[in-house]
């Protein structure tokens, strides 16, 4: 299935049904009177968060959604039925924006969430509604209100506990494949990862979701490479695992390049907690590894966010997904940060539950 994380959709709610002008005409009934029923309400346009979806690919083939018009009123005081809703089923983590792509309408983060995007028009009144003491036989009825039309932008942001970032070919996909059941494409050339991937990590009897995104290069915020739009998929992560290739020319420069792109992207990514690790340590000799590690330590001292205890990590981790070196240590470090953030969020939620 092709991954699609943004789509533009036209939606329109249903018009209300028209009221009815009708009079009771029955044999042997001298005074029938008006009996026109009201029109039915038009259908709404509803977005629903469902399980089992992980892409917006359905909205590549259908971009127009219209709810049904309410039924018209009928004689004998029969009101029209309500029009059927148009339901947009979206995956968890979908944000709905107006056409300007800045005004947020809804953020769907849990399965079962529903939000009404456009309300249907009200049905018109039938002539029975307009009966008064001085107007016993009104011959007027209201038409139904028109529905609302809107162009919206759906934007998917994957929900994961931890995210992998780094330059192309830094070993992110290999790491994801080694610690989860995911099977990303792995090759010895840049940009083998063209869309984000998710995997569930199981470590020490616990689970967390790990996200892998395409690599960043210098100038990604200006559109170089694959750009930086995929960084939206790690905005919700509690911690980032920054992989720096030990076989590269200069680990410090590589680290600063990615940090600069995070700062240029914004959205608080540059302040997000991160764990830094030298990857592919099995492919370098001890002397080169020591030199790269010192370069990375100096770069980390001048850039990067602090950990939860307020201190910067003195030394990066060393790992190799191919030989499983340092993988368990990296996962346990990620779990420690994730647990800390979860406890902080739960404590904050409990403090906000009750107020005198």
Image (tube, rainbow, N blue to C red):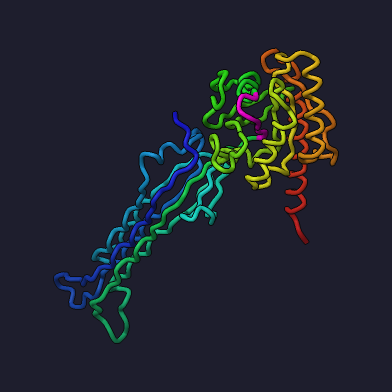
Question: Which region shows up in magenta?
Answer: 161-170
Q: Is residue 228 above or below residue 185?
A: below
Out of 242 and 157, give the one closest to the viewer: 242
Predominant secondary structure, magenta span? loop
Out of 119 and 338, give the one closest to the viewer: 338
Q: Is residue 228 magenta?
A: no
Q: Is residue 163 magenta?
A: yes
Residue 256 visible? The answer is yes
Q: Is residue 14 above or below residue 60?
A: below
The residue positioned farthest toward the bottom in the image shown: 134
* Residue 49, x across and y down, in percent: 51, 42
> Residue 200 vs residue 77: left or right?
right
| Res 243 → quadrant | top right
| Res 354 → quadrant | bottom right
> Residue 108 vs residue 125: left or right?
right
- Looking at the rendered image, the quarter that the C terminus falls into is bottom right
* Residue 281, x across and y down, in percent: 73, 17
State the residue at coordinates (37%, 62%). Answer: 121
Out of 185 and 41, give the one closest to the viewer: 185
- Looking at the rendered image, the quarter that the N terminus falls into is top left
State the residue at coordinates (81%, 20%). Answer: 290
Q: Is residue 206 above or below residue 222?
A: above
Out of 43 and 191, give the one closest to the viewer: 191
């Amino acid at each position: 299935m092709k991954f699609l994380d943004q789509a533009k959709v036209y939606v329109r709610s249903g018009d209300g049904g028209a009221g009815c002008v009708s009079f009771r005409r029955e044999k042997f009934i001298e005074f029938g009177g008006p009996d026109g029923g009201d029109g039915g309400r038009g259908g709404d346009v509803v977005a629903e968060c469902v399980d089992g979806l992980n892409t917006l690919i359905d909205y590549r083939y259908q971009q127009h959604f219209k709810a049904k018009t309410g039924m018209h009123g009928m004689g004998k005081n029969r009101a029209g039925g309500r029009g059927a809703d148009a339901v947009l089923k979206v995956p968890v983590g979908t944000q709905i924006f107006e056409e300007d792509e800045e005004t947020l309408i809804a953020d769907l983060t849990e399965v079962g969430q529903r939000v009404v995007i456009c309300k249907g028009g009200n049905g018109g009144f039938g002539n029975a509604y307009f009966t008064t003491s001085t107007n016993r036989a009104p011959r007027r009825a209201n038409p139904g209100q028109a529905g609302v039309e809107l162009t919206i932008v759906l934007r998917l942001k994957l929900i994961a506990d931890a995210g992998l970032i780094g330059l192309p070919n830094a070993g992110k996909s290999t790491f994801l494949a080694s610690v989860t059941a995911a099977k990303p494409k792995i090759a010895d050339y840049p940009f083998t990862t063209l869309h984000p991937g998710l995997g569930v990590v199981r470590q020490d009897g616990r689970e967390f979701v790990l996200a892998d995104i395409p690599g960043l290069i210098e100038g990604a915020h200006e559109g170089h490479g694959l750009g930086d739009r995929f960084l939206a998929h790690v905005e919700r992560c509690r911690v980032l695992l920054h992989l720096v290739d030990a076989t590269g020319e200069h680990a410090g420069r590589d680290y600063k390049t990615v940090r600069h792109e995070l700062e240029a992207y914004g959205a608080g990514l540059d302040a997000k907690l991160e764990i830094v690790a030298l990857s592919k340590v099995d492919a370098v000799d001890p002397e080169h590894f020591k030199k790269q590690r010192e370069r990375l330590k100096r770069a980390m001292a001048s850039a990067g966010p602090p950990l939860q205890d307020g201190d910067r990590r003195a030394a990066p981790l060393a790992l190799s997904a191919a030989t499983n070196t340092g993988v368990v240590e990296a996962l346990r470090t990620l779990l420690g940060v994730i647990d800390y953030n979860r406890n902080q969020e739960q404590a904050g939620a409990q403090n906000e539950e009750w107020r005198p």
